[in-house]
Image (cartoon, rainbow, N blue to C red):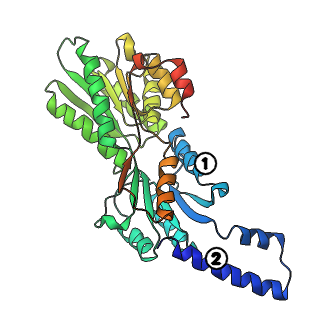
C-alpha cells in the first residue's frame, strides 16, 4: 500500500522520459531528477534547533536517510512554533512525500493535520515527543523516550544521594525548572518529580516555573529564585534538560553559591549530552538522566520494514541510562556520540 504511490509516480516518469526523448534533448538536471525518481521521499519536521540535543537528533535522522540508501530527506525547522510545523506537514502532503517524520513541539493540536496525512495515504512516524490524538490510527508509529521513566530514574538516584546526607530541619526544598509546557518531555518529567514529592512528606517544591528548555530561561529563573528564596532554603534544582541546568549553574556561579558534591544545591538534569556528563563526572551535576537523541537508526528500521510491507510496533522506546559521578570516566564520555 505504501509503495503504490511511488510506483505510479515512477511509471509516469518513465512515460514522460520516453516522450521527451522522442522530441527533444534533456538537460543534466532533468536527467539527474529522473535518476532520483525512485528515491523514497521523507519529510522531516523538527521543532527547531534550540539545543545541541535537538541538533544531534536532526543529524541522526539525516545520517540514516541518505540518497546512497535510497532516500531523499526534506528537512523543515519549525522555529519553535506548532503552527509552523503544521504548515510544514501540509507542504509535505502537497509534495506527495512517501513518509512524514515529526518531532512535535507539544502533544495536542495535531488531529486535523494528521487526518489530512492519513487521507493522503502518507504514513506518519512520531519521534522524540509523542502526540495525544482522538484516534491513534492517525499515525503509524512512535519512536522516542519514555519520559516518565526517565524522571523516575532520576528521582531514584536523587533519593539515594539525599539519604546519605543529613538535613537539619529534615526538609528537602526543590526548585523545579520545567521544559516547554505541554511537551511530552515536560509532562513525563514533571509528573515524576510531583509524584515523588507526594510520596515524601519532607520534600517540597518551593518554586516551579517554565524554562522553555533554554539556558537563558534556566539562568533567569534560578537567579530570581536565589534572590527571592535564598540559597540556604534550596536543596535541589530539578532541571528538565541540560540547557536549563547550564543556566541554573551559571546563576549559582554568578551568585557564588555552592552546588553539587561539595555540599551545596543538588542539580538534577536530563539529556546527558557530553558536556553535561563531564559536569556530572566532576560532581557539579548530581544526577544526569539520559535522553537519547540517536533515534535515526530506530526510525530507519521502521521505514525499512514498512517498505517491505511488514507490520511495525506502535511504540518503540530508545535505550537510555541514568548517571551519577561514580558511573562516569573520561573514556566512557569520549566514546559517546552526543
Say left or right for 53 vs 164: right
Q: Residue furthest left?
A: 201
- Whether pointer 2 and pointer 1 mark residues with C-beta atoms closer than 8 Å, the reply is no
N-terminal of the pair, mark 2 or mark 1, is 2
Q: Nearer the viewer, mark 2 or mark 1?
A: 2
Which class describes the residues within 10 Å of circle 1: few (<14), some (14-19), or many (20+)?
Answer: few
In the depicted structure, whether residue 144 falls above or below residue 309? above
Left or right side of 328 for 67: right
Which of the 4 image quarters holds residue 242? top left
Query: What is the CA distance from the residue labelled 2 to the residue labelled 1?
Result: 25 Å
Q: Is residue 196 above or below residue 210?
A: above
Left or right, 241 with respect to 15, comes to: left
Can see residue 47? Answer: no
* Image quarter in which the C terminus is found: top right
Residue nearest the viewer, comparing 98 with 246: 98
Circle 1 — which element? helix
Does 99 appear above or below 322? below
Q: Position of residue 181 (x, y in %)?
A: 35, 48
Tag on residue 293? Answer: none
- Dot label at residue 63: 1
Q: Please tell me whether mark 2 sits on a helix, a strand or a loop.
A: helix
Give percent across and percent down for residue 131: 35, 57
Does residue 138 appear in the picture of this structure? yes
Instruction: Give 330 or 268, whichever is nearer the viewer.
Output: 330
For disc 2, the marked residue is 10
Amino acid at each position: 500500500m505504501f509503495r503504490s504511490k511511488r510506483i505510479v509516480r515512477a511509471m509516469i516518469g518513465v512515460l514522460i522520459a520516453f516522450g521527451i526523448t522522442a522530441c527533444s534533448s534533456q538537460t543534466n538536471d532533468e536527467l539527474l531528477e529522473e535518476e532520483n525518481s525512485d528515491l523514497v521521499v521523507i519529510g522531516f519536521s523538527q521543532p527547531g534547533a534550540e539545543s545541541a540535543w535537538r541538533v544531534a537528533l536532526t543529524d541522526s535522522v539525516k545520517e540514516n536517510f541518505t540518497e546512497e540508501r535510497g532516500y531523499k530527506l526534506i528537512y523543515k525547522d519549525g522555529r519553535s512554533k506548532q503552527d509552523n510545523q503544521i504548515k510544514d506537514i501540509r507542504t509535505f502532503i502537497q509534495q506527495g512525500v512517501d513518509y512524514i517524520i515529526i518531532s512535535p513541539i507539544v502533544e495536542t493540536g495535531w488531529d486535523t493535520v494528521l487526518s489530512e496525512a492519513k487521507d493522503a495515504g502518507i504514513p506518519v512516524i512520531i519521534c522524540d515527543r509523542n502526540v495525544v490524538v482522538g484516534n491513534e490510527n492517525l499515525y503509524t508509529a512512535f519512536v522516542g523516550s519514555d519520559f516518565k521513566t526517565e524522571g523516575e530514574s532520576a528521582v531514584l538516584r536523587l533519593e539515594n544521594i539525599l539519604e546519605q546526607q543529613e538535613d537539619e530541619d529534615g526538609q528537602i526544598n526543590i526548585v523545579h525548572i520545567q521544559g516547554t509546557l505541554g511537551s511530552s518531555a515536560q509532562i513525563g518529567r514533571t509528573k515524576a518529580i510531583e509524584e515523588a514529592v507526594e510520596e515524601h512528606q519532607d520534600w517540597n517544591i518551593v518554586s516551579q516555573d517554565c524554562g522553555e528548555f533554554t539556558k537563558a530561561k534556566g539562568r533567569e529563573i534560578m537567579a530570581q529564585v536565589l534572590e527571592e528564596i535564598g540559597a540556604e532554603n534550596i536543596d535541589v534544582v530539578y532541571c528538565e534538560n541540560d540547557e536549563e541546568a547550564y543556566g541554573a549553574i551559571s546563576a549559582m556561579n554568578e551568585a557564588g553559591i555552592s552546588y553539587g558534591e561539595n555540599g551545596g544545591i543538588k542539580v538534577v538534569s536530563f539529556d546527558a549530552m557530553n558536556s553535561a556528563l563531564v559536569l556530572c563526572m566532576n560532581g557539579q551535576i548530581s544526577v544526569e538522566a539520559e535522553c537519547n537523541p540517536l533515534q535515526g537508526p530506530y526510525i530507519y528500521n521502521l521505514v525499512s520494514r514498512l517498505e517491505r510491507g511488514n507490520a511495525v510496533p506502535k511504540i518503540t522506546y530508545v535505550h537510555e541510562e541514568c548517571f551519577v559521578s561514580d558511573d562516569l570516566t573520561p573514556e566512557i564520555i569520549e566514546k559517546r556520540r552526543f
